[in-house]
Amino acid sequence: MNDAVETTRKKDWINIVFFTLTPIIGVVGTALYTWHVGFHWWMAALFLVLYAFAGVSITAGYHRFFSHKSYECSPVVQAFFAFFGAFAAQQSILWWSSGHRIHHKEVDTDWDPYSISRGFWWAHILWLFYKSPKNGFTNVPDLERNRIVAWQQRWHRQIMILGGFGIPTAIGWMFGDPIAGLLWGGFTRLVVLHQTTFFVNSLAHTLGQQTFDHEVSARDNWLVALVTFGEGYHSFHHRFPADFRNGIRWYQWDPSKWLIRSLRFTGLASNLRSITPPMVEQARLQAALLTIETRIASASPTLKEEVQRRIASARESLEHSFALWRQHTEERAAGLSDRWRQTRRSAKLRLKQARREWRSAIRMLSQAPNLA
Ligand SMILES: [Zn+2]
Ligand SMILES: [Zn+2]
């Protein structure tokens, strides 16, 4: 980081104490206490329910709705995200979204608040130990106009304390043990949610495949997706941040996406934004080609010719698929229900063909003896 940025950063002692004490209480404290009083099913249930409520409020709410506007949703849903999002102790929607939009715009540079280029632990947690530079929230004018966001900006600390710690204590009290409620539903839930969320900024920028963009550190990491309600498919997300999905395949774990789709089904969400399959494939192809550029250049003339021929053919199939996809959306808009399904099927077949072609080109190259 350059000096101009460094000198403006002062240590944030409240955060340092908070992020040091909460794991000690949430891990060691909960373990010792449970060892003494015994474990009951309601403690796990309380942990899981609040973990899920606060978790999806960060992923489907703070992240995909407020920061990226990847879909629209009713004020009831927004209020849910604002309320339970505050339980996660990740500051307000306004602060979170402003920093996150900078992360996308300036990714991997000095201006990225949790830049992985400053190291794994900086991106994971150390960046929170310093006061963030004041930017006046200039990049979130849309959110400043939102009344629910403004309300949450005023009350998020009170909601975090009274809701995030008070509610589990009260529920614990109903089961006869307020301290167990506070520990499992308050501290342990908070600490697990903190660390798993932080994995998106650290692990998903370090380990995994750069499937969709080789020039950005973001990676697709299914393990991170598993513990963050689907946020681990981070290469896709950085390439297409306005898409409401992070995992695009049916078998990829993305409960935030499933939640958003269910909200649409019940009429509580609309205008879900997503990238078309040909665009996804094009990004994948571009990223893959970038990795083999030097190998193509150093290949033997005959191999080079064959590889280039296959790539050209893949591009042609992709172009075909784009045209068919456009045709399918037009047919769909015109209500030609028997036709558009058929056209979409043909578009997808072309895509598969394109993928087979460029993958075979890459395979040829990797199997050939390296002449470089
Ligand atoms: Zn990122
Ligand atoms: Zn994002």
Image: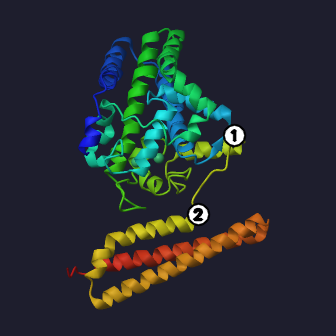
Q: Of 215 and 207, which appears nearest the observer? A: 215
Q: Nearer the viewer, residue 353 or 118?
A: 118
Q: Amino acid at mark 2?
A: Thr
Badge 2 vs badge 1, beta-carbon distance below 8 Å = no
Q: Residue furthest left?
A: 372
Direction from residue 75 to residue 168 in the image, left or right: left
The residue located at (52%, 20%) in the rendering is 159
Q: Determine whether the residue tagged by mark 2 lies in a helix, strand or loop.
A: loop
- Provide residue 161's location: percent of width, then percent of height: 47, 17
Whole-percent x, y for residue 222 in the image: 41, 50
How many callouts does the rendering have?
2
Q: Nearer the viewer, residue 270 or 359?
A: 270
Please provide percent x and percent y for residue 319: 56, 77
Residue 168 appears anywhere in the view:
yes
Determine the residue positioned at 36% across, 19% down.
30
Residue pointed to by mark 2: 276
Residue under pointer 1: 268
Q: Residues within 10 Å of mark 2 (few under 14, many from 20)?
A: few
Q: Amino acid at mark 1?
A: Leu
Residue 93 vertical placement versus 269 (above, below): above
Lower position in the chain sequence, tag 2 or tag 1: 1
